[in-house]
Structure formats: structure tokens, C-alpha cells
Image (cartoon, helix red, strand yellow):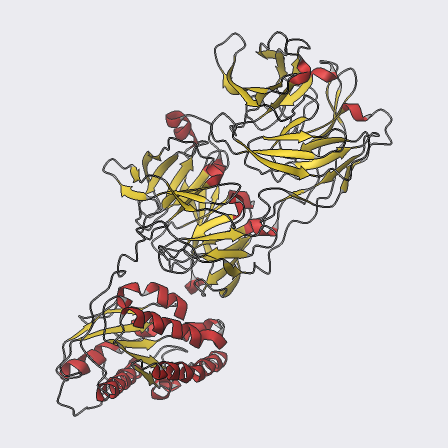
Amino acid sequence: MQAILRAYHADTPVGDSAFLRVLPIGDSITWGSHSSDRNGYRNTLHNLLTKRGNSVDFVGSVPSGTMEDNQHEGHRGETISQISASSSEGIHAGVNLVLLHAGTNDANLGIDIEHAAQRLKKLMEKIWKYNPTAVILVCQIIPSSTHEIQERIELFNSLIPGVVQTFIAAKKRVVMVKMNEAVDVADLDDNLHPKDEGYVKMANTWFDAINEADSKGWITAPGDPTEGGDEGEVCETTPTWSLPHLLAEGAKVAKSDGDFIPKWNTRITAGEASCKRANLRFFDLDGDGVKDFACLDSDSSEVSVHLNRLTDGHVPDKGDLEFEVAKGGIGRPASGVLFADLNGDGRDDFIYVNPDGEVDAWINLGKDSSDSGWAWKSIGQIAGGVGATEKNLQMADINGDGRADFLLVDPDSGEVTGWLNKGAEIMPDYHKLGIIASGRTTVKDDVVFMGDFTGEGRADYMVVSKDGKVSGYTNRLQEDTALIPRWLERLTLIDVSGLASVPQAGVRMVDLNGDGKVDFVWINSDGDINVWENAGEGGKYQPGEGVFICDLDGDGIGDYFWVDENGHGWGYLNVGHGDNLWHDLGNTAIGTHIREDLRMAVLTKTGRADYVLIDEFSGRADWWQNLGVGQDWGWESRGVAATGPRKTFEAEYGGKFTGKNVRFADLDGDGFDDYLYLSPRGSVVMWRNLQTNPISWGLPKLVANKAEAVVPSNIRFADINGDGLLDYIVVDPVSGGGRMWANLGVQGDGSIRWNTPEVIASGASTGPGYAIQIADMTGDGRADYMSINPDNGRVDLWINTCSG
């Protein structure tokens, strides 16, 4: 720097020759932005101190500038709370002198300036917690040449003296530095940062403040560094959790797709007199997502099938050639047979209700070389003693996990008693929910069907009146009722009462075109099949289902990203670090794809979450890079990140590939998210991110294969103990409680070693599993527990306090 230094005539070292371990802490001004050598004020001040005769060491995790001792905790673009979270190394270094200039970005972004001084106070308390005898020189920050920013700076600066006086009264070693008077707008290189001459003025002002502290005898030898620097604070015990508190009220823009609006396509005749109505069933034999037509032998339940091969996405006028797929059994009449997917593999299984109420099942294993050409595996009794009959048992998925739940529908009252299928193996594991629908609005002779008419994946409640009119109640998630649905108001789905030829007895509600919504099917007494395809819209999404907790700005802390059903995203930066305080970025992503295909993944060294779309069939990943604050939080298309591992997975590991089980997470701890595929029983195959540009991936490796099966939707990856490695967490779908397998690191063969499981959260008050997200929201390196309200996106937070 060419500016002239102000002379100082003292000839004795500071603090009786104390070794000065100095923590410069703040934002880009501490970093030295816009100075010619990126040293900012630090080199000038370092020279002034060494000329007094002191040994000096500047400390921190960030190096910048040409000077030799160039470490500090200057974090460009960060607010006070973010600086606190990012500065662990310097805060734990055992310093005796702290140079604190923070708050410029709070003012620049307009983040709750009225409480910014309190956030500064919390940062100072944190520094003193680990450095109790340190002197903190805290600045009233330098001005801005932008009028509205300067107004915020003036408000912030006016609140700092009150904070300082509080600490003086508590006998803390603190000096307020009037940096706002030492530097004026003529000293700025842009609207926020000094030029070289301005940085020299800052150095001289710091030096004067140090001498003031020295005159009071406050500067003494530095303390010893404490644990929690580079590594963060690792929790060695089972974590404890704070009481829950409101973290976010939900995005103001959060919305649903409106109420369901019924619409039905023109009637199609899909089959003519090929099977008696009583013996006709619709089930997905081959797992292609559409229901096939099955005819059962009246006495033996032998099953013959016409495969449903869609024509341009619509139900064909007839199925493929009939073929036998199951021999049935003597004394097992067709009236007791139903089909449903018990294990979530996409193929419907064979279920039989015995006259004594016991329910047996055979798992559909797909094609084989047997006489029938199809394989079935008996799993024996799946239920008994609960009052099941062929008239009251329905199997439908009420929570959207792809596994059929066990429902008893009272034929007289319409009341539904439910058991949730929690199983991940082929044998269902039923959890009794109790009464999930009261049936109070049904009348005599009404018939109840449980099926999904909106396409959200959860079974809705439908009532068919005696004259064929169908009404429905939409199944809505709710946060605190242990998976018992909330039913929206009754709406008329279809009214065919004017057609005398459509009596109630022939009505079925079943999805025949594979769009996820049940169609209106009427079968006449001869077995002719008539279909009105469901073309209704809306009613599928709830506002809170669009919440993604991900790191948008690369500071290592979870932010709030709300995405609508079409992929448009609104970002909110976490500046409260555990408090309900967010910086609204606005609508940053203009999506063109459905939300179910979206993943947020860190694919570059910036640490920022990128926007990734997954092809459901192949697993191909297309991505848009998060350009960050410098590019107004825009996104740039980068093409294909991964071509899709479907063929590889199915060939090497077996089972059907589905895009919904693709995840991204940094399991090896290198800062880049890896491509993961979760099998139907919860094992994890990893393609390691090789950190190249363009992106490339390592060979597939089975890195988790638990003895017990786990439903993929219940799996989370998060760093619970703060060791820098993401742990494998299973969330209970009913209670929201969690069990963890701690990640012990990558082994020599590329696999990952996991610790024995432990319970980390009881879930007594968290809400059901689908509402739970786990991520570090406070900046301490340990993941916290969150429950997301599906109705509005509100977030309740349980902070991970380690051992309390």
C-alpha cells in the first residue's frame, strides 16, 4: 500500500510484551476485498504491532492476501449469524485480541436490522465463552454510499453502544471502535468496500483502540486453544434435543394446486362378456403401472389374465391374449380373492380372505419357468382375528408409500378401521391406526371404495350411491395425528344417475390407464367393461409438500427452498441459525418439470445446492448450477450430470429400478454429493462423485446393506454427531422417531463402515415420519430435527444439543 502510515511514538510492547494471538473476524472487509493486495487492513496493522516489539499471530480458517501471516475469519457475503457459524477455528484458537467488524451484509440485505445488534451480542458472547480474557474491539461499521443501505447502517451503529455498555457493566474487556467516523464514503472503492487508503485508516484506528485497551491493562497472555476448531464439536453420546420452537412460518408464496375439479372422458368399452362380473378383478400383474384384467375360476380361484396394453395412453378396447398365471386352490372360491401390492415392488400380490377371517397372501415374483409361467411365493397368514371378511376388507395405500394398507370398511356405516403396512420385507408389518374415517355421511345402501382419485398417491374415500352417483373425500396429510388422514369436504365426482343402465352393483373405481387416478368403471351383468377415464385436475398437492431444506449459499447451513408442483422455486436464506429469521431471495428458479423429479444436490466445490431433475425410468440426471449471490441467485443449465444407472443396477443388483429412489448425499465426506440409489429394502448403492468438470462418477459400490429391511421413504442422511460424515437414519413413519447408524468412514475397498444402530429421537412429539427433515440449521455442524407442516410449510425445530 502506498498511503502514509501515522506515526506512533510508544517504544514499549503491548501488554508487557504479551504474545498477540489476534482474531480478525467479519466479512469481506476483513477479507480485504477491493484492496490491491487483498490484505485489507491486516498487513498494515500487523506491521504496527510488530514494530512495538510484540510477536503477532493472526488466526482463522480463511487465508487471503500477499502477507505471510494471512489467516483470519473474514467471510465474504456473510451476515453476523453466518460469520458466527463459519468461524469456529478462530473462535476456538485461544485468542487475546479480537478485531470485530460485522454487520455490513445484514445492512446490505436488509435483514432485521432492528435486531442485528443483538445478533452481534450473541457472537461476542460466543467468543468470550471460549476466550474469557480476550479483549474484543467491536466496530460501529464503516458507511455505504448507497442511501438505503446507509440508513440501515446508521440504525445498526446506533444500537451498538447499548450492547457495549451491557458488557462493560458485566466487567468484560471491550472497546467500541468508531470505524464509521474513521472511514468516510470518499475512502470507498465501491458502495461498501474501502480502497487502499481507506484500509490504512482502518488499521490506524484499530491500533489506537488496541493502545486504549493496553492503557487499561487488559491485554494479557493468550489462552489455550479449545476443542471444536477445525473439526467442529463431535458429539460422542446419544444426542439430546431442545424443546421445539418455530423456525419458519412457511413461505408466503406456498400454495396448493387448488381443489380437485372432476372431469371424465367419453365412455370406452374395454372388454365384452369375457368374464362374469363377480369373478372379474383388476390388478397389475407385471408391474408396468397399469391394471390388467383378470378372470377367476369360481371354485378354485385359478387366475387368467388379459394384459392391459394402453393405446396412446388410453384404455384399449380389449386386452392382450388371455393366459393363466395362477393355479388357484381347491375350496378357495373367487369371492374371497383380492389383489394388492403388499411389498412395494409395483406388482400386485394375491390375497385370500378365509371364511374364518384369516387372511393369507402370495407374493407376485414375476415371470418364471413354471407351468403357469408366473411365480408366486406363499407368505402364509398376514392377518387374523380382526374381523376381516370378503365383504369388508379392502387393501389400499393410505399414506403414499407404495404399500397396500389393511382397511376394514363397515358395509352398513361406511366407517373405516385402518392398519398401516410398515413392512419393508415381503411380509407386511401392520400398525393399527384405529378408525380413520367415521362414515357419518353415508346412508343406507351406499357402497364405499378406497382409492386415489386425485393422483397424489394416497387412497381417498369414495361413496357410490344406490343410483350410481359417486362422491368423494380427498385424503389430506396432517402433521400431528399419527397418519390418520384429514378428509376434505364432500364433492360429487360423477353422476350417472340419469343412465338407467348403470346400477350400483357394477361400479368399480380403479386406475386403468396408469395415470395414478382411479377411473369410473361399470361392468354389466354379462361382464362387459365400460370405462370413463378420470381427466380431473387439482387436489393433488399440499403447500407444505414443496419444502426443500438445502444449502443454497454454500455456508454449510440449511436454507428454505419452496418449490411448486411445476418446479418453480423460491429461496429463503437462513440468517437466524436456529431463529425464525430468513432473507427472501424471491423466485429464483423457473422450473418446467414436476416437483417429484427434483433433487437438490451439491455438485460443485461452491458448496451450493444445485437443481437436479431425475428421469423416473432411467435415473438420468440433468442439472442446473446454482450461480449464487454474484449472479442474482440464477441457475445455468449444465446438461447431463449422470446418464442413469437403471440397466447397471438391475443387472448387478437385481430388482426393478425406479427414479423415486434416487438420492444425492455426500457419504464420503469430501464436500461433493454422491449419486445414490436406495433399493426397495433400503440398501444403498453409491456412485462416488469424482469432483471433475464435467461431472464424472466412480463405479457402483454397495455401501449399506442392513440386515433388516427399511422402506426407502423412511431413510434420511444427515450428520448427527458432527464428525463431518453423513449418518444413515431411519425415521419411524408413525411416530417420527429416529434410529441412526453412524458413518465411520470409507474403507479401503470403497465400502462404508457403519456403527451399530442407536435410537436418537423418540419422536413422541415430532409428528409422523413424512413430515421429518434432518439438517444442520444452527451452524454447529450437527444436524437438527425438523417437522414440516404439510398444510403451510411451517417448520418446527428441535436443536441437536449433543449431550445437553
Residue 258 appears in the rendering: yes
Rendering quarter of residue 168: bottom left
Quick check: 51 left or right of 1?
A: left
Quadrant containing the C terminus in the rendered view: bottom left
Residue 5 appears in the rendering: no
Rendering quarter of residue 792: bottom right
Quick check: 603 left or right of 225?
A: right
Residue at the spot 49% in from the left edge and 57% down from the top edge: 244
Numbered marks: total: 0
Q: Relative to 673, does residue 125 appear above or below in the rendering?
A: below
Rendering quarter of residue 294: top right
Q: Residue furthest front?
A: 385
Relative image position of residue 446 (x, y in whole percent): 79, 31
Relative image position of residue 588 (x, y in whole percent): 51, 58
Residue at the spot 33% in from the left edge and 74% down from the top edge: 29
Q: Relative to 699, does residue 632 appear above or below in the rendering?
A: below
Q: Nearer the viewer, residue 234 or 30?
A: 234
Quadrant containing the N terminus in the rendered view: bottom left
Q: Residue furthest bottom?
A: 9
Q: Nearer the viewer, residue 713 or 765?
A: 765
Relative image position of residue 122 (x, y in whole percent): 39, 71
Relative image position of residue 65 (x, y in whole percent): 24, 70
Q: Relative to 71, does residue 618 appear above or below in the rendering?
A: above
Quick check: 365 left or right of 301?
A: left
Q: Nearer the viewer, residue 333 or 694?
A: 333
